[in-house]
Image (spheres, helix red, strand yellow):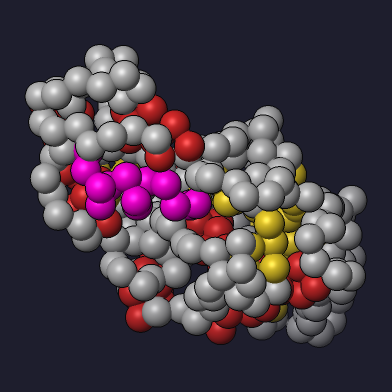
């Protein structure tokens, strides 16, 4: 349950205007903010808007579409004290639209904890709606499973001092990028989608002083698919969002970003996978997205060949034995096992 009348980034909120070249006690809070979200290469403690800090402020101002003065001014203070996503805006000081993508298009998710801020399990339904929005434009299938079934994505409401990625100070939620470019869990699963349940109040739809679950979930799921923050005003993937508002429809910028990341690649030329077979080939897709071929060999046995990893080569042919006299049929059970 969130505390009442929470102010995001309060140390930043109480600072006066600081012009380029000026000093102010507590300016380290601004420098820490800029470092945390990718604008400064490290946390500075100069208490001054020096050349490096001013350059970082200009990047922040340009990214967010406010006057790029390079000073810590009123526009910047107002924007910096909005609640926002915990993921960085820039990577290595450079704006990025996408990171890497998943190597499969079927992902599983589970809920482990909810919030007392809304009645019943409405928060879970709101997140499910966000999954459906991305599925409709990104070519993904998201299947809900139990938490003990090794989900790809694990969703829950956590204390602000979440040990995997702190949300203290003004962070609404955090997620992570796909396994090949993760910054929170790196390559391991499940990927987190964690909401701050200490400092922020949650709602279904717009409500005074609260944040709409579906709005924030839609944003964080964009990161899980591989999208960075957008500098386009109004985009779901913009880093900040206000209370008492909703943003539950993907914009063209969001759609273009995910479709560019998962655009179909061009076909290769024909390439031999070897073998001598005496039947038609049957193909199937493993639960983790790898393709597998089955055919009858010259000895009458079932032979198969599979991707060793997505887009990373093929195994040799391997016999499964048996003596068969027809083509082979394959199917996938409900739990992902092939037969």
Residue 200, percent from left and from top: 65, 51
Report which quarter residue 27 is drawn in.
top left
The residue located at (35%, 22%) in the rendering is 26
The residue located at (84%, 53%) in the rendering is 112
Residue 148, percent from left and from top: 89, 51
Residue 83, percent from left and from top: 50, 51
Q: Is residue 273 above or below residue 186?
A: below
Asked if residue 7 is among those painted magenta in the image, a careful observer would answer no
256 relative to 288 in the view: left or right: left
The answer to whether residue 163 of the structure is visible from this angle is yes
Foreground pick, 48 / 91? 48
Q: Is residue 242 above or below residue 228?
A: below
Q: Which residues are magenta?
A: 72-84
The answer to whether residue 316 of the structure is visible from this angle is no
In the rendered view of the protein, which quadrant contains the C terminus? bottom right
Foreground pick, 153 / 274? 153
């Amino acid at each position: 349950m969130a505390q009442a009348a929470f102010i995001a980034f309060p140390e930043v909120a109480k600072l006066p205007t600081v012009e380029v070249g000026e000093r102010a006690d507590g300016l380290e809070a601004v420098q820490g903010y800029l470092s945390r979200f990718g604008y400064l290469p490290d946390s500075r403690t100069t208490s001054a808007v020096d050349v490096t800090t001013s350059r970082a402020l200009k990047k922040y101002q340009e990214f967010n579409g406010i006057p790029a003065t390079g000073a810590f001014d009123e526009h910047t203070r107002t924007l910096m004290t909005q609640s926002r996503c915990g993921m960085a805006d820039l990577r290595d000081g450079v704006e990025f639209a996408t990171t890497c993508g998943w190597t499969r298009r079927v992902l599983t998710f589970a809920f482990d904890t909810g919030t007392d801020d809304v009645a019943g399990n409405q928060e879970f339904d709101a997140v499910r709606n966000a999954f459906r929005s991305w599925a409709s434009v990104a070519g993904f299938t998201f299947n809900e499973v139990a938490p003990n079934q090794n989900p790809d994505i694990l969703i829950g409401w956590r204390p602000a001092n979440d040990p995997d990625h702190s949300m203290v100070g003004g962070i609404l939620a955090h997620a992570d990028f796909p396994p090949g470019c993760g910054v929170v869990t790196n390559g391991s699963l499940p990927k987190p989608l964690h909401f701050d349940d200490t400092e922020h109040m949650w709602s279904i739809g717009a409500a005074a002083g609260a944040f709409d679950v579906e709005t924030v979930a839609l944003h964080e799921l964009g990161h899980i698919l591989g999208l960075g923050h957008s500098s386009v005003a109004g985009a779901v993937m913009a880093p900040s969002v206000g209370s008492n508002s909703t943003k539950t429809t993907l914009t063209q910028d969001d759609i273009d970003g995910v479709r560019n990341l998962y655009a179909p690649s061009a076909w290769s030329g024909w390439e031999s996978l070897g073998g001598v077979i005496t039947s038609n080939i049957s193909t199937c897709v493993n639960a983790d997205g790898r393709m597998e071929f089955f055919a009858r060999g010259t000895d009458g046995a079932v032979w198969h060949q599979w991707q060793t990893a997505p887009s990373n080569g093929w195994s040799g042919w391997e016999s499964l034995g048996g003596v068969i006299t027809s083509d082979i049929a394959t199917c996938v059970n409900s739990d992902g096992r092939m037969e």
